[in-house]
Image: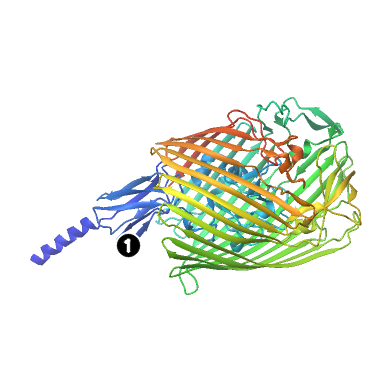
Amino acid sequence: MLKIVAAMVVTVCVSAFAHSQKIQVLDNYTNQPIVGAVAVQNQKTYTSNAAGLMDLTGITVPSEVIVRHPNYASMTIQISNRELTVVSLFEKNMDLDEVTVSSSRFLEKKSDVPKRIESIRSSDLQQMNQTSSADVLASSGAVFVQKSQLGGGSPVIRGFETNKVLLVVDGVPLNNAIYRGGHLQNVLTIDPASLESVEIVYGPGSVVYGSDALGGVMHFHTMKPLFSETDTLLIKTNSYARYFSAANGYSGHTSLNLGWKRWSSVTGFTYSHFGDLTQGKVRTGKYPDFGERTFYVERINDTDSMMVNPNKNKQVGSAYSQYDILQKIAFKQNNFVVHTLNIQLSNSSDIDRYDRLTQTKNGLPRFSEWYYGPQFRSLISYDLSITKKSKLYDQVKANVSQQWIKESRHDRAYKSDFLNRRTEKVMVSTFLLDLEKKARKHEIRYGLFAKYDRVQSNAEKQNIVVDTSGSLDTRYPDGGSSMLTGALYLTDAIEISDKVILSGGIRANYVMLNAKFNDRTFYPFPYSEAKQNNSAVNGNIGIILQPVKSIRISLSGSTGFRAPNIDDLAKVFESVVETSNTTGKLVIPNTNLKPETVYTGELGVSYRYKDQVQVSALGYYSRIENVIAVLPFTLNGSDTAFYNENYVDIYAAQNANYGIIYGAEGSVKAQFLKYWSLSSSINYTYGRLYSEDGEKPLDHIPPLYGKTSLQFTWKKFRAEFFSQYSAWKRLADYSDSGEDNLAYATADGMPSWVTYNLRIGYQFSSKLSAQVACENILDQNYRTFSSNISAPGRNFIVTLRLNTFK
């Protein structure tokens, strides 16, 4: 009898102290589940799933646990006999413990990486309220963005642009063989509505990413399919409708996630329409007409007519539309192996090259038509993730992808009946294999990379009156061109102590290029084929010192490598007009180009006061050897040619002796009075090019720019007041290559500017929220440096969001 009583007592005690427990972790503002929150007790870790739930069955109650997430303030909670405990976490303004994958392709704490990394989180993307990825980058204040038309945006990192910075989507590099050295608008093909986060890595990323990552890497992470951890189907939807006044445009998005235990799927669709953009009305007294759109061309009865624009601030010729599709399907083979199929498609309408439509010659429009055909990008990729440990690895990531890109250029001179059409089709095949192994204090990562680009270029001259066509010189070699890239890399991070982390890496690259010029009717090239084989070895080394908990010092050195691509080496002809009344420039092929190499060193210091204030400062210096620059050239002994009914000076991409870029970056982040947060950043860059002609400004160097933001969050209300600003770009600091677009600035350069902006959001429930923003409140008229279209004037943005989770 005593044994039975004792057994009953033990059973009751076990029931009391090992009661079934669950915690649901939610975002305090959106009331949406937080994935990846952790709680630790007795050396056992519990992690929240897609529903924000973590099962604590077996935990001793009553007890106390700390719930943590890198992006949120930690919270200590009491676990009682209640079956479900709901925890609401406040998102942090400071990313002290945030993790990143862009530096090494594997998860690691940003504080363990010696390079500067900026993250744009999902909540930031939602709050920004932007409808293009270029505007997301510009609005963040972390990247300078140039624009030649509304449908585009060319990111600049530390004075490096286009084919010298790398765009990556879900681990797959987007840069291809015809990424040019001028201004590039391909970031338009990345749908911001489908993004979960954006990570920007500053400085050469060539060891992990290879060629093109001289200035940095922008890694765009799209939505991931979520699995259910129960027998119940997990359903998650996300939709919004948006209106923006400056372009009289609208945008709509919807996504659906279906999750089972082994299978999951996420589908997204976005459509955006932009009308002609209205610029700001308030101008300085010295430049009362700056940016005015006084005319446009309209074809009436088969004749081009120059029309007076009744609203000079309406930038006629900037309208466009676009749709984007995302489809991911994931299969969880077991707890260690996941397969993912990733399909993306982006397509736009025709996009007018706004700046060319504003050019005049002898008081008349230079062009009646100048537009890009639909900007088309499709991607299909397969990802394999293995997390089961072996002797060779702890984790494996493999990716095989195929991309198809189509772009075209169409131009017709004023009063001409002939429309020039040039079309490029690019096919890109990529294979990546990355492995990680942790051994004692070492985190070793290694892998291989292979990429094949195939380019086909076509052209024709069409008579728009009688609908006949004739031959025309192609933009790239008409016989086709290709690039083959292969690489191996190895990195290691050593945590010598809790105060010292040492890291380094090495990469071996090999690049082959082949291009064929079949038709040399238009110009007698001295060659019919271009071939190159280039190899390079890159490395980096960095150290992080944390003498005390509040101070972090980082020092790093790295090299970057960029082999000439098809655009550098074999672009046939492109007319670049300097001003309305001067001789233009003609860029022709040069088969003797050498690879560019950059050597960069940077030193950063940050100070943290508790979890409330963080102050950071960083300085860097880069030297570019054999920098590729557009310089005067000759063809058959002549430095001029007659092209497109104009006499033009001949130029070609050539290797200058070297270039230098140096600069400084600073930021302040603070959390105070619980509901308030402040952030401010500033960036300064200086660049010079050294060639046989001496020293001169390097192109693509932005002026000093920055952003300051004050944010208030209380219950379901959130408001942000922020200012963005840029200093002067004086005439003396403009490059003479034409890439800085002085023709679209004032006679003194590009004036300084500042905007004041307000965003307000309200979360009505966990499902419904609304946002209202007023950008450029004072309706200032301005252009960002090197841009050929004026920025939006006062712009009201209204967004209504609907999220469901079941």
User: Outermost residue, front direction?
Assistant: 694
Q: Is residue 696 above or below residue 800?
A: below
User: Outermost residue, left direction?
Assistant: 1
Quarter of the image with the N terminus in it: bottom left
Foreground pick, 406 / 435: 435
Q: Position of residue 786 (x, y in %)?
A: 70, 42
Near mark 1 (Cα within 10 A), the count class, few <14, some 14-19 or many ≥20, is few
Q: Is residue 86 above or below residue 772?
A: below
Q: Position of residue 549 (x, y in %)?
A: 40, 54
Q: Residue at x 71, y 27 (%)?
A: 286
Q: Residue at x 57, y 41 (%)?
A: 706
Say which element carries label 1: loop
Tell me how many marks there are: 1
Residue 525 figure quarter: bottom right
Q: Is residue 199 above or below residue 507?
A: above
Q: Is residue 80 above or below residue 275?
A: below
Left or right: residue 429 compared with residue 636: left
Foreground pick, 747 / 467: 747
**Tell me, what colour scheme is on the image?**
rainbow
Specify the amino acid type for callout 1.
Gln
Q: Position of residue 271 (x, y in %)?
A: 62, 42
User: Outermost residue, bottom direction?
Assistant: 391
Q: Is residue 107 visible?
A: no
Q: Position of residue 335 (x, y in %)?
A: 44, 64
Left or right: residue 801 compared with residue 595: left
Q: Which residue is denoted by mark 1 in the rendering?
A: 43
Foreground pick, 399 / 180: 180
Q: Is residue 72 visible?
A: yes
Left or right: residue 358 compared with residue 384: right
